[in-house]
């Protein structure tokens, strides 16, 4: 789990965190998640992999304000070897869900060509596939 504290600059005139910040917090949490599984961005880039965001689906459930803490759970929602979907659940300090989302990513080399991780980076492929299978078994 990743914890973010809402900064003053992230709020609007009403004192509510602007909706665009939740996307940034997703990235912060995703980077921390990858680090926790031993695949921080530096290591991914050393393997010659870039992983652009293809899309984001999100749902705002409640709002947050300056100095609120937001706990963000991240997991591998699904993984095909070519596409990866992360799930996100953000809760406030009272445990109330304030935001849920999914982000979809692909894998490319630095020249912009699509990669197949099973062939091009089997160690990362194995980790992501294992996490996706664990998620599927919990359903």
Image (cartoon, rainbow, N blue to C red):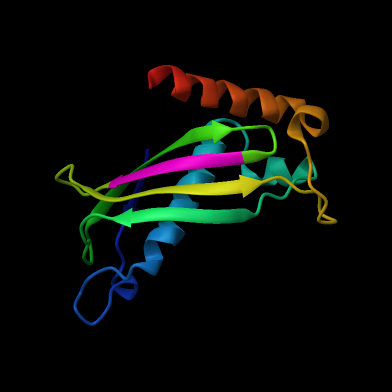
65 shown above or below 127:
below
Magenta region, main secondary structure: strand
| Extreme residue in the top direction | 137
Q: Is residue 41 left or right of residue 116?
A: left
Q: Is residue 33 left or right of residue 61?
A: right
Which residue appears at 54% of the width and 55% of the height? 55
| Extreme residue in the bottom direction | 13
Q: Which residues are magenta?
A: 84-90
Q: Nearer the viewer, residue 89 or 43?
A: 89
Q: Is residue 88 magenta?
A: yes
Q: Position of residue 73 (x, y in %)?
A: 37, 39
Q: Nearer the viewer, residue 82 or 24?
A: 82
Looking at the figure, which quarter contains the N terminus? top left
Which residue appears at 59% of the width and 39% of the height? 84
Looking at the figure, which quarter contains the C terminus? top left
137 shown above or below 63:
above
Total marks in image: 0
Which residue appears at 69% of the width and 28% of the height? 125
Q: Position of residue 67 (x, y in %)?
A: 23, 62
Q: Is residue 49 magenta?
A: no
């Amino acid at each position: 789990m990743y914890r973010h504290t809402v900064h003053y600059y992230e709020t609007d005139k009403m004192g509510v965190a602007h909706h665009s910040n939740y996307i940034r917090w997703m990235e912060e949490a995703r980077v921390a998640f990858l680090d926790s599984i031993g695949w921080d961005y530096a290591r991914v880039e050393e393997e010659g992999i870039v992983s652009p965001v293809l899309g984001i689906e999100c749902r705002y459930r409640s709002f947050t304000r300056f100095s609120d803490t937001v706990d963000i759970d991240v997991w591998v929602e699904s993984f095909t070897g070519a596409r990866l979907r992360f799930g996100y659940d953000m809760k406030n300090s009272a445990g109330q869900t304030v935001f849920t989302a999914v982000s979809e990513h692909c894998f490319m080399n630095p020249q912009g060509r699509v990669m197949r991780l099973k062939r091009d980076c089997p160690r990362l492929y194995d980790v992501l596939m294992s996490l996706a299978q664990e998620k599927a078994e919990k359903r």
